[in-house]
Image: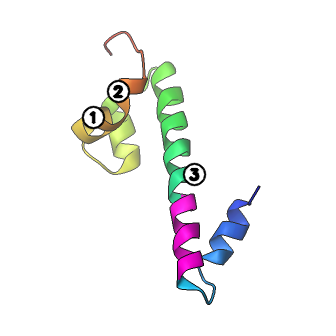
Amino acid sequence: MTTVTELAEATTGEDPVTALAAVAALRRLLEELEAAHVTEARSQGASWEAIAAALGVKRQTAHRKHAHRIIDGGR
């Protein structure tokens, strides 16, 4: 398994293709982390407005991106 540190270091290497692959891997990791934290925030009662503010996006954007995987009783 490649660590986050190794991926970050690979983004500054000599080979641009390797750097791009590392960027893509970091992006996937960040998307997974964001989804997990949004799910946890909703389970603890955070509003879509609060989540959106934390992510720096509009409420509708956060909801559109994440609501499909969260069962939250219509909150």
Q: Residue at x 40, y 15 (%)?
A: 72
Q: Earlier in the sequence, mark 3 or mark 1?
A: 3
Is 20 in the magenta? yes
Badge 1: residue crowd in 10 Å (few <14, some 14–19, many ≥20): few
- Residue to which mark 3 is pinned: 29
Which corner quadrant of the image does residue 4 belong to?
Answer: bottom right
Residue 47 appears anywhere in the view: no
Q: Amino acid at mark 2?
A: Ala
Badge 2: residue crowd in 10 Å (few <14, some 14–19, many ≥20): some
Q: Mark 2 touching mark 1, by CB under 8 A?
A: yes
Mark 2–mark 1 Cα distance, whole angstroms, equals 6 Å
Q: Earlier in the sequence, mark 3 or mark 2?
A: 3
**Secondary-structure class at tag 3:** helix
Q: Amino acid at mark 1?
A: Arg
Mark 3–mark 2 Cα distance, whole angstroms, equals 19 Å
- Residue to which mark 2 is pinned: 67
Which corner quadrant holds the C terminus? top left
- Residue to which mark 1 is pinned: 64
Q: Position of residue 62 (x, y in %)?
A: 32, 38
Which corner quadrant of the image does residue 51 belong to?
Answer: top left
Tell me the magenta residue range.
Answer: 17-26
Q: Position of residue 13 (x, y in %)?
A: 63, 85
Q: Residue at x 71, y 67 (%)?
A: 5
Mark 3–mark 1 Cα distance, whole angstroms, equals 20 Å
Which corner quadrant holds the N terminus? bottom right
**Secondary-structure class at tag 1:** helix
Left or right? Give the position of 14 relative to 42: right
Badge 3: residue crowd in 10 Å (few <14, some 14–19, many ≥20): few
Judging depth in this view, the residue of 15 and 51 nearest the camera is 15
